[in-house]
Amino acid sequence: DPGDSVALGMLVTYIVAGLFLTVGFSSRLMSVGVWVLMVSFSLRNPRMYHHVDPLLRLYGLGLILSPCGAMYSVDAWLKRRSGNTEIPMCAPWAQRLIQFQVSMVYFRAFWTKIEGQPWWDGTAVYYALHWVDAVRHPVPPLFDQLWIYQLLTWGTLGIEFCLFSLIWARRCRYWVLAGGLILHVGIQWCLNLDLLEYAIVAGYIPFLFPADLERWLRQKDQKEGHDLQTEGADIHHQDRP
């Protein structure tokens, strides 16, 4: 109702809190506010449903319990500016909780799918990609073949199985995440399921090993520093008579 000033104020507050949480400003307070408002909107009008809503509520609860603003955030930047350069050490149990939730999403998806005959005979993806109300880009006639749909159907089952089992093995994790990324990029290209695919891929971030992330950021900083040194040397060389 456009005339409901309370609902409008809650919506504006929700958007602002979401932006602050995204950049990591007052992270703990904003995470609580976003989650409470998200649940409130859902309970106010249960018919206003999007595929991504239950997943975001799971993520939001995990963020409330986690030190989400401790490292890469405005909160951390302000803390460093105040002279506190100590690197925070946090127990990863909240991160494990989010990982477990994402893993259980795939566990439920896998076991729900194998109860259906189309997933056994390899035709399930055909019906999904020909769902008129959700198709974003139609399948090219060249790929409209039974063996291709069987490969995609069984491949989907295999990837989802790995995403709740082999993902916990360190040597397999990045390969499994790459398979999941390919799966969801393909779904996003073919079907219009709100923001579900973006949200589930965002859930892969807690699975990144901190040491690997730090190494990647360090290499990036070193490369940028090297590029600046090279650019400075070129300018100095051009200024010489």
Image: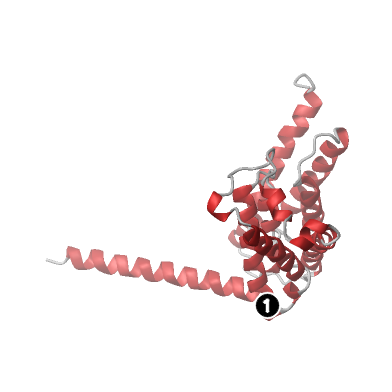
Point 54% across, 71% down: residue: 216
Image-quadrant location for residue 179:
bottom right
The amino acid on which the numbered mark 1 sits, given as a three-letter code, is: Cys
Up-down relation of residue 145 to residue 88 (above or below): above
Nearer to me, 161 or 115 = 115
Image-quadrant location for residue 105:
bottom right
Q: Residue furthest left?
A: 241
From the image, which quarter does the N terminus lie in?
top right
Q: Viewed as shown, does residue 201 lie left or right of 221? A: right
Point 70% across, 62% down: residue: 156
Nearer to me, 210 or 88 = 210
From the image, which quarter does the C terminus lie in?
bottom left
Q: Viewed as shown, does residue 45 lie left or right of 157? A: right
Q: Residue furthest right?
A: 43
Residue 43: x %, y % from top left: 88, 37
**Can residue 25 be seen in this snapshot?**
no
Numbered label tally: 1
Residue 118: x %, y % from top left: 78, 56
Point 85% across, 33% down: residue: 45
**Can residue 170 be seen in this snapshot?**
yes
Q: Viewed as shown, does residue 36 lie left or right of 131? A: right
Q: Secondary structure at mark 1?
A: helix
Q: Residue furthest front?
A: 146
Q: Residues within 10 Å of mark 1 (few under 14, many from 20)?
A: few
Residue 231: x %, y % from top left: 30, 65
Residue 87: x %, y % from top left: 66, 71
Q: Viewed as shown, does residue 82 lie left or right of 67? A: left
Give the labeled residue for mark 1. 172
Point 56% across, 75% down: residue: 215
